[in-house]
Image (cartoon, grey):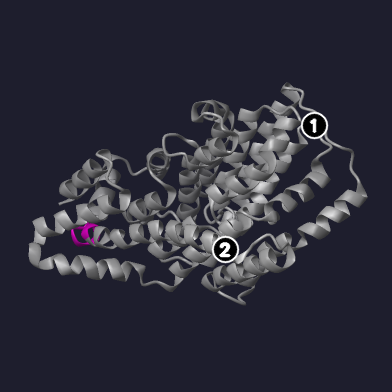
Amino acid sequence: MAALLFSVFITLLIIGVPVAFSIGSAAAVTIVAGLGSGKLMMIIQRMFESCNSFSLIAVPFFIFAGDLLSKGKISRLLVEFCESILGMIRGGLSIVSVLAGMFFAAISGSGAATTAAVGGALIGELKSRGYDEASSAALIAAAGTIGVVIPPSVPMVLYAVIAEVSVSSLFKAGFIPGFIMGSVLILIALFQAYSLNYPKGENFSLKRFIKSFIYAVPGIMMPIIILGGIFSGIFTPSEAAAIAVVYAIFVSMFIYRDLSLKGLFEIMSGSARTSAVIMIIIACSGPFGWCLANWKIPETISSSVLSISSNKYIIMMLISVIILIAGVFMETSSAIILLTPVFLPLVKALGVSTMHFGVLFVVGIAIGMITPPVAINLFVASGITGLSLEKISRAVVPYLIGLIIVFLVIVFVPLFFPGMIL
């Protein structure tokens, strides 16, 4: 049954069938082959059951909030605030690119939205000041990967639902890895800035700083409200997502006044389409997950891997390589929904914390956002700049290497120091 399930799934992917329908069709074929056509109704039941989770309400709301903010003034004002602090340093705009990406990550929960918001606000300015356009676009795309690591994070919500761990605890565990990723990108960007003799910006001005801070306050308050409310226990992550939408609409329509009712409807329609793609994948993963559980496929895989080696460091290295490869060929949400049920029994058998695994899984899959062919952040950066994907892909290599090193640190440091989640 395992061979049939995975062979049908892989075959459908190869011939170009969308991931959701590949997952659902593979499950349907396996159920009919193993149990007969009389069990087809169970497929529909499992599809509905897999979507019946209160925590999943956060997914469309965070997507909607991210889209609202990425298409308005907030991203540009946040960039101006960051530049008022660091713009005077050589290569200061590169640092601003990363910091703005990290800040927007604490609002959007999406890598593509982070790349689009920061790229739209900064790439033109970077080019006009003499920064290498391909390298700048690559840096912003790389910083966009932090969008799903620093909370709120849509992939973390999906993992938490599947693995049955606390969304809030997983959010807390994402901060330090996100900051480490940002710090490494800044160091690489600074090295390039001095190597290529990038220009310095304007000298620090207290007046400019205060003015930009006042304009950016509504945007700065958003992550404080969302994350502060979650971690203080005032509201759940799902409620926080709804509050984020209400706050984003209020700020965009009544404070910055850059959003009309027509624009709101267009953004809502786009967010609904994005959410629908993720939800249909979740729905189709229901019968797929049932097949895995019914025929004990994850347990079989776990025992087979453990028979090769009982050394958890070697096995975690193998899992890490698989995660990185999966990120190259699969979209982030699809990979988490598909692979989490397969890896969890093996991770638990090794005695690895499911919280630690969730963090490293999200970081590893996020790196796939800048590794072609399925490199959504590079596609977004290419669309903004007009540069070819090949040119940006070459420029992203130093940042990619840096993020892979960070990923390996996140994988192995907690293994050597149990209980420590970076």
Q: Is residue 184 above or below residue 249?
A: above
Q: Where residue 75 sits in the image (x, y, percent)?
A: 68, 52
Look at the image and tell me whether residue 91 can be seen: yes
Main secondary structure type of the part rendered in magenta: helix
Residues at discs 1 and 2 in contact (Cβ within 8 Å): no
Q: Which mark is residue 90?
A: 1
Task: Name the residue furthest bottom.
Answer: 234
Which element carries disc 1, helix, strand or loop?
loop
Q: Which amino acid type is shown beneath numbered disc 2?
A: Lys
| Relative side of 390 to 323, left or right | right
Residue under label 2: 262
Give the extent of the magenta segment: 291-296
Q: Is residue 393 above or below residue 155?
A: above
Quarter of the view holding residue 312? top left
| Rendered residue at 60%/75% (across/down) | 233
Q: Is residue 65 left or right of residue 206?
A: left
